Image (spheres, helix red, strand yellow):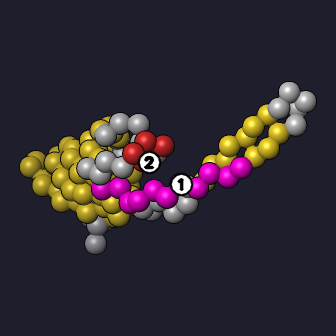
Amino acid sequence: VSLPIQLNYYFVNLQQLSFYTTAGMTVDIPISVSASDRTVYEDNSWTSSPIDYSIRPQVFMTGGVGFEYMFNSTLGIYLEPSIKYRLTSDPATNLLFEKNIELYIPLGLRLKF
């Protein structure tokens, strides 16, 4: 589960097309993480033992630029290339995150009320 908090600053606002920057914070809360260790013997028999991981919530700082095109006053589409930097440094999280910095490109529909 991810809880984002984000602020957008629109620096170009034409009739239907807008360009903006974004900055914020995201907290990712793992619901369930599980794995098992399987040992295979020479006679093709095997044993499996569960491994329990307790991974704490992860905090990220986010920032990016984006643009949106509004089809009408309430519905639009957006593209927002962004960077996500992980602030927490827990050795157990290396299972979920290889690097502290991620680049992602959200594309979606935006509803405004």
Q: State the SS at label 2.
A: helix
Is residue 38 placed above or below 61 in the rendered structure? above
User: In the depicted view, which residue is nearer to us: 28 or 18?
Assistant: 28
Q: State the SS at label 1.
A: loop
Image coords of residue 69 (percent x, y): 27, 49
The image quarter in which residue 74 lies: bottom left
Residue at image x 53%, y 54%?
53
Q: Is residue 24 left or right of residue 2?
A: left
Is residue 66 placed above or below 1 in the rendered structure? above
Residue at image x 18%, y 53%?
23
Image coords of residue 3 (percent x, y): 35, 64
Q: Is residue 11 left or right of residue 62?
A: left
Image coords of residue 5 (percent x, y): 26, 63
Query: What kind of residue is marked 2?
Result: Ala
The answer to whether residue 14 is seen in the rendering is no
How far, Cα to Cα, is label 1 from label 2? 8 Å
* Residue bearing the label numbered 2: 92
**Chain part drawn in magenta:** 49-59
Marks 1 & 2, CB-CB < 8 Å contact: yes
Q: Quadrant of the N terminus?
A: bottom left
Residue at image x 28%, y 72%?
113
* Residue bearing the label numbered 1: 53
- Residue at the extreme left of the image, as rendered: 11
Image coords of residue 91 (percent x, y): 39, 45
Looking at the image, tell me whether mark 1 or mark 2 is earlier in sequence order. Answer: 1
Q: Is residue 43 left or right of residue 36?
A: right
User: In the depicted view, which residue is nearer to us: 79 or 86?
Assistant: 86
